[in-house]
Image: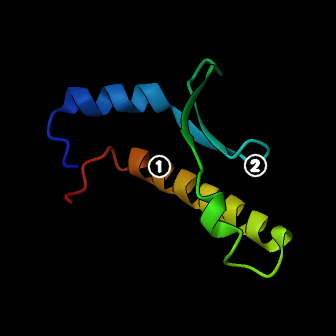
Amino acid sequence: MNLTNNMDIKQIKNFIGTAKYDPMGQYIWGVDEKGNYQKIADVRGWGAIQHMFANNEEAAKFQDDLGQFITDAINNKIKTDGNTKQ
């Protein structure tokens, strides 16, 4: 998605704040500057992920790594103000 309206970008950044991954619930939370949490995503795919690995421990680690990867990508996008072309 290419956001061209600076107001849209500002609203998105204000809504998300800083993204944080919660490995206990496989949630990605947005944390605003006041410390308020807003759930912005669930990391899904366990049905497929569990069959990619020899055991559940490896699969769970992958799911958490995936959740952190997505969280980092959100935070990096916020840092660049969402101004990168897609």
- Which residue is painted at 61% across and 17% down in the image? 34
Picture quadrant of residue 20: top right
Left or right? Give the position of 41 relative to 36.
left
Picture quadrant of residue 46: bottom right
Amino acid type, residue under disc 2 in the picture: Pro
C-alpha gap between disc 1 and disc 2: 16 Å
Does 72 appear above or below 6?
below
Crowd tier of the residue under label 2, counting other residues whose Cα lies within 10 Å: few below 14, some 14–19, many 20 or above: some
Does 66 appear above or below 2?
below
Q: Nearer the viewer, residue 56 or 1?
A: 56
Query: Residue 18 placed where, x, y %?
Result: 55, 37
Left or right? Give the position of 67 relative to 50.
left
Q: Nearer the viewer, mark 1 or mark 2?
A: 2
Q: From the image, tell me which residue sits under label 2.
A: 23
Left or right? Give the position of 14 relative to 1.
right
Query: Residue 50 placed where, x, y %?
Result: 71, 68
- Which residue is painted at 21% across and 60% down in the image? 86
Q: Are marks 1 and 2 in contact (CB under 8 Å)?
A: no
Crowd tier of the residue under label 1, counting other residues whose Cα lies within 10 Å: few below 14, some 14–19, many 20 or above: some
Q: Nearer the viewer, residue 15 or 42?
A: 42
Left or right? Give the position of 61 relative to 67.
right
Q: Which mark, by number, is residue 74?
A: 1
